[in-house]
Amino acid sequence: MKLRTLQADARARAHELATGGALALAIFFAVAALARLEAREPASTPIAPTELSVVAKAEPEAPKVAAPPAKPVEPALTVVEGALARRQTLGHALRKAGIDGGVIDQIVDAMSPVFNFRYAKVGDAFRASLSPAGELIEFAYTRSPIEAYTLKRQGEDLVAQKHEPKVVVQRAQLAGVITNNLYQSVVALGESGELAHDFAEIFAWDVDFSKAQPGDEFNAVYERRFYETKSGPVYLGPGRILAARFSNRDDDFTAIYFETNPAKGGYYRPDGSAAQRQFLQAPLNYRRISSQYAASRLHPVLGIRRPHLGVDYAAAHGTPVWSVSDGTVVFVGRNGGLGNTVTVRHRAGYETRYGHLSGFAKRLRVGDRVRQKQVIGFVGSTGLSTGPHLHFEFTLNKKQVNPATVRIPQGDPIGPGRMGEFTKARNELLALIGPTPFRIPTNEAL
């Protein structure tokens, strides 16, 4: 019995030990596992609540792209620019600037469809752009704000072009009383002296304006020309005179501009008769008459006395010379002491001769028909000459006559078929200019 009790106590003790040992063993293994975990993951510093921890994620490196090849640097152009000086041609100016003669010939030839350099004048501006090899790339030639020309290379060709801005025409009236001379009186009213020149030319056969007196009156209705710019219109100067009146103590002269056909116009009196003669008084714009028509004159080159059967007009070299009337060219070429000469035959037995020319109008040939004031040549000093001037001769029925005293026939009147149109135009212009002398100086747009 006692033995059984002891065995039961032993079993209970063993069970108790086994249970306690298992628990202790479990606790041991749990602590050991925690220790191993702490050893593998070291403790991190605690993050403050207000901080944000961001871990940057590495991006894969972008593949490298090769840079495009650099463009070749274009060689710089050589630019030559300037303006024509007194007694200087374009060729002289370009050669002086170092441009090759072959390039100059290219410019003249390529520009010929749009401009003839015989008309070049002092102050004309030029600008040439050339490659390092000396090839012409572009050329610009400017004569005024409304007249410019360019050459541009297109492949192997040089293409010429004329540039003209839009021109606006406005009618105006200028009237006043001569105080000294016509030119100064016009300028005093604020207009260009060109208007005085054009006004005097209309009445050149009726009035000697060099003898105009203070108190003589002038009145003109004319066109004012403007060209458009980004900042507004700019005044170019006076254009065509449409109606003109001149009054002195002895007489009153009136002229109306009328076009008898689209290509030709002229000035007529109110009754339709021509205000101008068949021939112009002079064949060019000249500075002065250097030698008059004379039966005997000491020749400046030969040093002997001989007839001088013409009039010499002093003018700058290259000044355009025009035919004084419609006619037919009967001679072009060299003519002894007269040098380069043109002779034009007109109707009713008249002929005119133009000598000492530097050159002729392009493509002028014997047999060509020319119109009044058409350019036929240019002032020079060829032949027996001491300086640039034009020698002008007038013949009637093959006999030389004094151009200053020969009786010039009247121009053609308005034909019966156009009289109705002329009367309408005349009445409109006379209403503007007034039927009587205009005694109050004025310069105003109409």
Image (cartoon, rainbow, N blue to C red):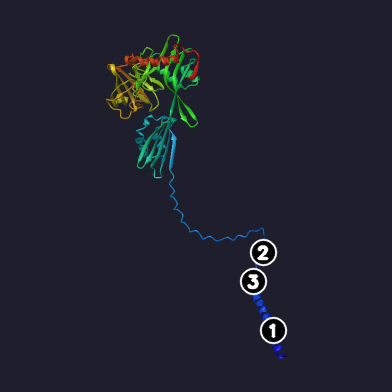
Amino acid type of the residue that numbered disc 2 sits on in the rendered structure: Pro
The disc at residue 12 is 1
Using the image, determine if residue 231 lies above or below residue 6. Answer: above
Amino acid type of the residue that numbered disc 3 sits on in the rendered structure: Glu
Q: Earlier in the sequence, mark 1 or mark 2?
A: 1
The x and y percentages for residue 377 are 34, 26
Assess whether mark 3 and mark 2 are in contact (beta carbons under 8 angstroms).
no
Using the image, determine if residue 386 lies above or below residue 69. Answer: above
Does dot 3 land on a helix, a strand or a loop? Answer: helix
Does dot 2 land on a helix, a strand or a loop? Answer: loop
The residue indicated by pointer 2 is: 46
The x and y percentages for residue 318 are 38, 28
Q: CA distance from mark 1 to mark 2?
A: 50 Å
Assess whether mark 1 and mark 3 are in contact (beta carbons under 8 angstroms).
no
Using the image, determine if residue 298 lies above or below residue 159. Answer: above
Amino acid type of the residue that numbered disc 1 sits on in the rendered structure: Ala
Examine the rendering and report whether any part of residue 290 can be seen: yes
Q: Residue furthest top?
A: 250
Examine the rendering and report whether any part of residue 276 can be seen: no
The x and y percentages for residue 101 are 37, 38
Q: Residue at x 39, y 41 (%)?
A: 137
Does dot 1 land on a helix, a strand or a loop? Answer: helix
Q: Earlier in the sequence, mark 3 or mark 1?
A: 1
Q: Residues within 10 Å of mark 3 (few under 14, many from 20)?
A: few
Q: Residue furthest front?
A: 1
In the figure, is residue 418 to the left or right of 142?
A: left
Q: CA distance from mark 2 to mark 3?
A: 16 Å
The disc at residue 38 is 3
Q: Nearer the viewer, residue 61 or 398?
A: 61
Q: CA distance from mark 3 to mark 1?
A: 39 Å
